[in-house]
Image (spheres, helix red, strand yellow):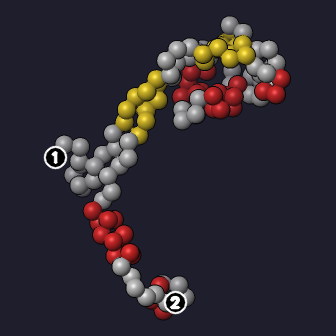
Amino acid sequence: MSGANASGYLESRTMKTETPTVKMVAIAADEAGQRIDNFLRTQLKGVPKSMIYRILRKGEVRVNKKRVKPEYKLEAGDEVRIPPVRVAEREEEAVSPHLQKVAALSEVILYEDESYSGAQ
């Protein structure tokens, strides 16, 4: 049974995607005063915070060609180097056959009132 674990559920498969090249971003006046870690969260949507902190810690993100700490506050005119980041995209997981049966039963309920709906 490929792709299924012992309980019969299909395992989540992931695909790796990568932003193609290094991105240089000039900081505008409205982005000034923002912490670099929060700025990167807006630029790298879908990237986990742990990955953002890792690339900051390793010095892959640079501001004005210098390493910065996550607490660094951006200033207008700063040049931010954002490296290519590999992100795992999750495919949809298969729904358990049991859940499909429950959903099918909910669709065939003809009449429901307070005494049968579970609400008291």
- The reply, left or right, for residue 24 in relation to residue 10 is right
Residue type at mark 2: give it. Answer: Glu
Along the viewing direction, whichever of 61 and 109 lies nearer the viewer: 109
Asked if one can make out residue 71 in the rendered structure from this viewpoint, the answer is no
Q: Residue 86: x percent and y percent?
A: 46, 25
Residue 110 position by quadrant = bottom left
Residue beneath label 1, please? 1
The residue drawn where x is 69% and y is 31% is 38
Q: Is residue 103 above or below residue 74?
A: below
Q: Is residue 27 above or below residue 93?
A: above
Residue beneath label 2, please? 114
- The reply, left or right, for residue 79 in relation to residue 103 is right
The residue drawn where x is 40% and y is 28% is 16
Along the viewing direction, whichever of 90 and 36 lies nearer the viewer: 90
Q: CA distance from mark 1 to mark 2?
A: 44 Å
Q: Residue 46: x percent and y percent?
A: 54, 35
- The reply, left or right, for residue 47 in relation to residue 78 is left
Residue type at mark 1: give it. Answer: Met
Callout 2 secondary element: helix
Mark 1 crowd level (few <14, some 14–19, many ≥20, 10 Å Cα): few
The residue drawn where x is 43% and y is 27% is 17
The residue drawn where x is 56% and y is 21% is 55
